[in-house]
Image (cartoon, rainbow, N blue to C red):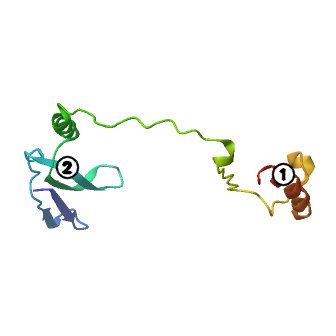
């Protein structure tokens, strides 16, 4: 029995009674052997208490078991990689990318707020003075 409610009439006499029944709480949940917890969904009441909970498991290994299995698999492994030879590289062989992710090309600023005046009219001269050093 979860709750019993009694309704009284205006004279204080019992006019009705309601009994709410619900299944008793089950035992403590344990993840089955050989399974791992993959998802848990919780429905909470306004006061934060758990109203319902759904737990999903599947066959698998715990992180600790997985580490042990990987260590066992690599036990006795001998690396066969050969170090690469040094390859002479010159500056002429290099290609460099200078990404300009947020150029603020349409930005409008006032020197009293930001220390610099900036608008679209200033873009071409600034671009001409800065870009040639980046492009070979």
Circle 2 residues within 10 Å: few <14, some 14–19, many ≥20 = some
Q: Percent x, y for residue 2?
A: 14, 56
Dot 1: element: helix
**Where 30 falls versus 82 (above or below)?**
below
The answer, for residue 87, to whether it is visible in the render is: yes
**Quick one: 87 or 45, which is closer to the camera?**
87
| Circle nearer the N terminus (2, 1) | 2
Question: In this view of the protein, which residue sits in the foreground, 56 or 16?
Answer: 56
Question: Which residue is disc 1 drawn over?
Answer: 130
Disc 2 vs disc 1: which is toward the camera?
A: 1
Report the residue at 16% width, 54% height from top.
57
Tally of numbered tags: 2
User: Label 2, on which residue?
Assistant: 37
Q: Position of residue 106 (x, y in %)?
A: 80, 64
Q: At numbered mark 2, what does the secondary structure look like: helix, strand or loop? A: strand
Image location of residue 51, percent across then percent down:
25, 55
Q: Nearer the viewer, residue 72 or 58?
A: 72
Q: Residue at x 20, y 34 (%)?
A: 77
**In this picture, residue 89 sits left or right of residue 18:** right
**Image quarter hosting the N terminus:** bottom left
Q: Residue at x 20, y 40 (%)?
A: 66
Residue 42 vs residue 36: left or right? right
- The residue carrying pointer 1 sits among few (fewer than 14), some (14 to 19) or many (20 or more) residues within 10 Å by Cα, namely few
Q: Position of residue 58 (x, y in %)?
A: 15, 54
Q: Nearer the viewer, residue 79 or 111?
A: 79
- Tag shown at residue 67: none
Q: CA distance from mark 2 to mark 1?
A: 57 Å
Residue occupying the point 16% across, 57% down: 3
Q: Are marks 2 and 1 in contact (CB under 8 Å)?
A: no
In this rendering, does residue 109 appear at all? no
In this rendering, position of residue 52 left or right of residue 89: left
């Amino acid at each position: 029995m979860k709750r019993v409610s009694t309704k009284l009439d205006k004279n204080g006499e019992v006019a009705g009674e309601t009994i709410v029944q619900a299944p008793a709480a089950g035992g403590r949940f344990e993840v089955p052997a050989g399974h791992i917890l993959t998802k848990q969904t919780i429905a909470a009441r306004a006061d934060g208490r758990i109203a319902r909970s759904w737990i999903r498991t599947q066959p698998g290994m715990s992180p600790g078991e997985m580490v042990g299995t990987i260590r066992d698999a690599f036990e006795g492994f001998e690396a066969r990689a050969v170090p690469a030879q040094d390859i002479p590289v010159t500056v002429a062989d290099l290609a460099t990318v200078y990404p300009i992710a947020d150029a603020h090309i349409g930005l409008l600023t006032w020197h009293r707020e930001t220390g610099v005046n900036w608008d679209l009219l200033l873009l071409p001269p600034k671009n001409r003075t800065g870009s040639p050093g980046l492009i070979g």
